[in-house]
Amino acid sequence: MPIDVMIDGYNLLHAAGLAKARYAPGELERRRARLLAKLRDLLDPAMLARTTVVFDARVNPPPVRPDPPAGPITVLFAPRDREADDVIEELLAKHSAPGQVLVVSSDHRLHKAARRRSATPIDSDAFLDQLEVDQHLAPPSGPVVSPKAKPPAAPTLEDELRQRMEGPPRGSDSAAARPDSVKGDLKPPSPPVDPLNDPAFWERRIHGGET
């Protein structure tokens, strides 16, 4: 089932260890970019286009120049008189299938609002931990290398005996069709003789010879 992800941006920034008490000019923008890059690395590609990150603007206003594009991730800034939680709640209220939404925040007020709309809340640190685990368990990416072809197996003794009994394939030269180890005028072994049908056996018995 498709899942939309709504993220409280600065809450996740703190959980990722990227937040500071004070920021030098331009530093907050760079840290936001690092957070979005981390999400691009950890999220499934199919989910990236369904992810919305909402940042507060009341305390940390958006930059004069817009942040660099975040790729398929949607980035929103809350109005100055509102918080990211308010915007996420509004998005949930307008969503056609809120039961398919994952809300990422450690704010329990937002958790309650998500549950009222049947959405699934998750703490920011738990969300990051799960993404790290998923990435660790994922198979390595890269071109698929086909296994090297195995050299043909040497004929077994059973194969050679079968070839001696059956002879060369039809339409082929008998000497060329036989392997080097069995070339020559080899006759198939004679079938074993049943002693009861062997005249010499009965002659020895009648005359008291060795049986």
Image: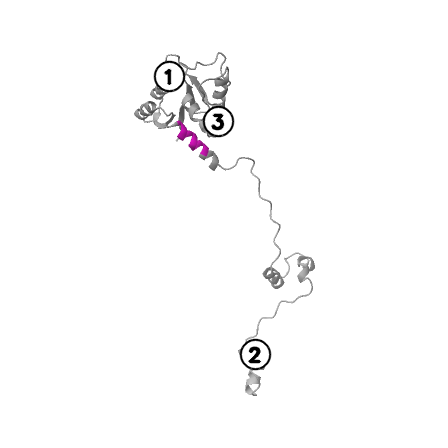
- CA gap, disc 1 and disc 2: 108 Å
Disc 1: which residue: 83
Indicate the quadrant where residue 211 lies: bottom right
The residue lying furthest to the front in this view is 21
Task: Give the residues drawn in magenta, as a range.
Answer: 124-132
- CA gap, disc 1 and disc 3: 23 Å
Disc 3: which residue: 38
Disc 2: which residue: 198
Q: Earlier in the sequence, mark 3 or mark 2?
A: 3
Where is residue 160 shown, x and y percent of the image? 62, 61
Residue 34 falls within the magenta-colored stretch: no
Going by the numbered disc 1, the residue's amino acid type is Glu
- CA gap, disc 3 and disc 2: 90 Å
Q: Earlier in the sequence, mark 1 or mark 2?
A: 1
Q: Main secondary structure of the magenta part?
A: helix
89, 14: nearer the viewer: 14
Indicate the quadrant where residue 200 lies: bottom right
Going by the numbered disc 3, the residue's amino acid type is Lys
- Residue 131 against residue 70 in the figure, above or below: below
In the picture, the quarter occupied by the N terminus is top left
Where is residue 158 shown, x and y percent of the image? 59, 61
Going by the numbered disc 2, the residue's amino acid type is Asp
Give the colour scheme shown: one colour
Callout 3: helix, strand or loop?
Answer: helix
Callout 2: helix, strand or loop?
Answer: loop
Q: How many marks?
A: 3
The residue drawn where x is 47% and y is 34% is 135
Graded by Cα atoms within 10 Å as few (under 14), some (14 to 19) or many (20 or more), the crowding at tag 2 reads: few
> Contact, CB < 8 Å: mark 3 with mark 2?
no
Indicate the quadrant where residue 117 lies: top left
Q: Does residue 164 appear anywhere in the picture?
A: yes
Where is residue 119 shown, x and y percent of the image? 34, 26
